Image: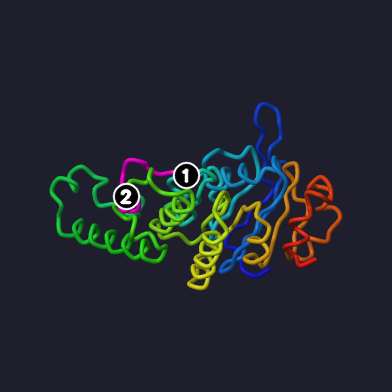
Amino acid sequence: MGLALLDVRGLRRSFYGVHALSGVDLEVEAGRITGLIGPNGAGKTTLFNCVTGVVPPDGGAVVFDGVDITGWRADHIARAGLVRTFQIARGFPRLSVFENLLLYGDRQPGERVATALLRPAEARRREDELVARASAIARRLNLVRVLNDPASALSGGQKKLLEIGRVLMASPKLVLLDEPVAGVNPTLAREIAEHLRGLVAEGLTILLIEHHMDTIAQLCEHVVVLAEGRNLKEGTFAELAHDETVQEAYMGRREWDPLRRAAGR
């Protein structure tokens, strides 16, 4: 492993006595896409929630960019540069795509009442910067033609792109993507994969949950497998695709077939 931008050690979380995470360890190396896979109920989304402050862990440590952020509030973690998406795209359905992008820009000048009312030169400059950034992100993600449409009018795939655009507006160092191609047609799934490759080439780091094994195989240099809230295996996708322990976790060879096909077997 190279430099770990995110280092998770012994993370634990229970809900009403049920152990969702039982001491998970995870390292995410800077400048690449790390995959996080496992059967349903493995604890993947709970791990995302604990790392990003949506729910507090019961134990363990989360170190991001050299700083222990365990137990921080979600907004403080996002300001530090660690941002996530959700399985179901969020946002404000009645606002336009452009307004949704602007809303998630960092260092909003209108967050203070006096600034919002008086609009000093510094605030106007920041507003102009956010408008320019939102426009650039929309162009990059091919959302320009729907820029003035309400978010509710977007297709499922376009909502996934808007979700990616939303996190990019926060100027992150690390993005946690929760199933970015789930329910997306194959053509748009390939487009999203290309966007992710381009972002990593420019210095972004990504931790990716995805059940589409073709996407994991194409994008991820390193893959971590969770099962029943614990680390099971990690390595390259090709190594994991032929590992009997991982196959067992996915409940039999029939359900494992998509992974073996993605590995080229």
Is the residue marked by circle 2 packed among few (<14), some (14-19), or many (20+) residues within 10 Å?
some
Looking at this view, is 61 or 194 the one in front? Answer: 194
Tell me what residue is drawn at x 68 percent, y 57 percent.
213
Residue situated furthest right in the rendering: 244
Q: Secondary structure at mark 1?
A: helix
* Magenta residues, dominant SS class: loop
User: Residue 35: image x %, image y %?
Assistant: 65, 58
In magenta stretch: residue 6: no
Tell me what residue is drawn at x 31 percent, y 48 percent.
96
What's drawn in magenta, residue-wise? 89-101
Quarter of the view holding residue 193: bottom right
| Quadrant showing the C terminus | bottom right
- Dot 1 and dot 2 residues touching (CB under 8 Å): no
Which of the two discs, 1 and 2, labels the residue nearer the N terminus? 1
Residue at numbered disc 2:
149
User: Residue 250: image x %, image y %?
Assistant: 78, 47
Q: Name the amino acid, label 1.
A: Ala
